[in-house]
Image (tube, rainbow, N blue to C red):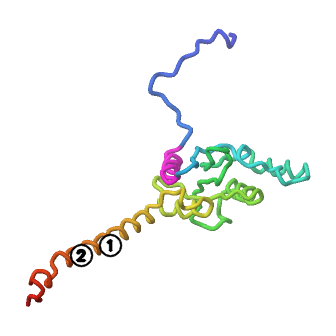
């Protein structure tokens, strides 16, 4: 009869509703593994919380148009500075990310337009289950110094260079230890 007389059932244990899709979770994990220093990746949030559309706009009608464009649209991942909580860059997942901008969804095109107007870098990535480390690093290098990124390619090249240097030192030590001049008592062994 009345709403407050209804019996409310509590959810059973083990029932859980995730607010992050598996693809979005894969992107967050990949970006978080790459970031170092004072940067962190946070799951997506409404675009109007990240982008302040009235920062540089004087006209109230332009402000309303800008806010109306991004109302109800979400970024999938935001990279922020831990100290200032200022957004460094944002990621948006789009099924047509492999095509040109004109083929993107309307929400993605609106977010691109707004993020360009406030000079916030936005990267559009495809919706897949596993993201390529090297492509994500290439995107992030455009906005974050490479010292604050874990770059597997850079680490691999450093390791190869170190191994080559060590091999050169070992061969030099081997040549010094097995010098035919020293073994022959000053006379070269033939």
Which comes sooner in the sequence, label 1 or label 2?
Answer: 1
Instruction: Specify the quadrant that holds the N terminus.
Output: top right
Left or right of residue 47, residue 13 in this image: left
Pick whichever, 135 or 14, lies toward us. 135
Are the residues at dot 1 and dot 2 in contact (C-beta closer than 8 Å)? no
Residue 88 on image: x %, y %: 65, 53
Mark 1, residue position:
164
Q: Is residue 179 left or right of residue 73?
A: left
Q: In this picture, is 146 found above or below 55?
A: below
Residue 92 spot, x, y in % from top left: 62, 54
The residue at which mark 2 appears reads as 171
Eyeballing the image, is 19 above or below 184? above
Considering every residue shown, the one lying at the far front of the view is: 186
The residue drawn where x is 59% and y is 12% is 7
Q: Position of residue 85 (x, y in %)?
A: 66, 44
Question: Helix or strand or loop: what does disc 2 sit on?
Answer: helix
Residue situated in front as seen by the camera: 160 or 7: 160
Q: Judge whether residue 54 is colored magenta.
A: no
Q: Rate crowding at label 1 as few (under 14), some (14 to 19) or many (20 or more) other CA atoms within 10 Å.
A: few
- Seen at 60% across and 49% down, the residue is 77
Q: Is residue 27 magenta?
A: yes
Residue 18 vs 32, above or below: the answer is above
Residue drawn at 32 percent across, 72 percent down: 164
Dominant secondary structure (helix, strand or loop) of the stretch shown in magenta: helix
Which mark is drawn over residue 98?
none
Left or right, 158 with respect to 164, comes to right
């Amino acid at each position: 009869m009345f709403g407050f007389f209804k019996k409310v059932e509590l959810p059973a244990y083990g029932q859980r509703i995730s607010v992050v899709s598996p693809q979005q979770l894969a992107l967050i994990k990949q970006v978080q593994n790459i970031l170092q220093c004072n940067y962190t990746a946070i799951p997506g949030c409404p675009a109007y919380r990240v982008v302040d559309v009235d920062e540089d706009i004087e006209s109230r009608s332009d402000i309303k148009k800008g806010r109306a464009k991004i109302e109800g649209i979400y970024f999938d991942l935001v990279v922020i500075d831990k100290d200032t909580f200022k957004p460094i860059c944002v990621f948006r997942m789009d099924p047509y990310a492999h095509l040109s901008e004109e083929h993107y969804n309307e929400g993605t095109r609106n977010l691109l337009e707004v993020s360009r107007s406030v000079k916030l870098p936005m990267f559009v990535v495809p919706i897949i289950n596993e993201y390529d480390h090297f492509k994500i690093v290439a995107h992030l290098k455009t906005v974050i110094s490479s010292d604050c990124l874990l770059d597997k390619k850079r680490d691999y090249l450093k390791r190869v260079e170190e191994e080559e240097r060590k091999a050169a030192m070992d061969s030099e030590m081997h040549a010094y230890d097995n010098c035919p001049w020293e073994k022959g008592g000053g006379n070269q062994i033939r």
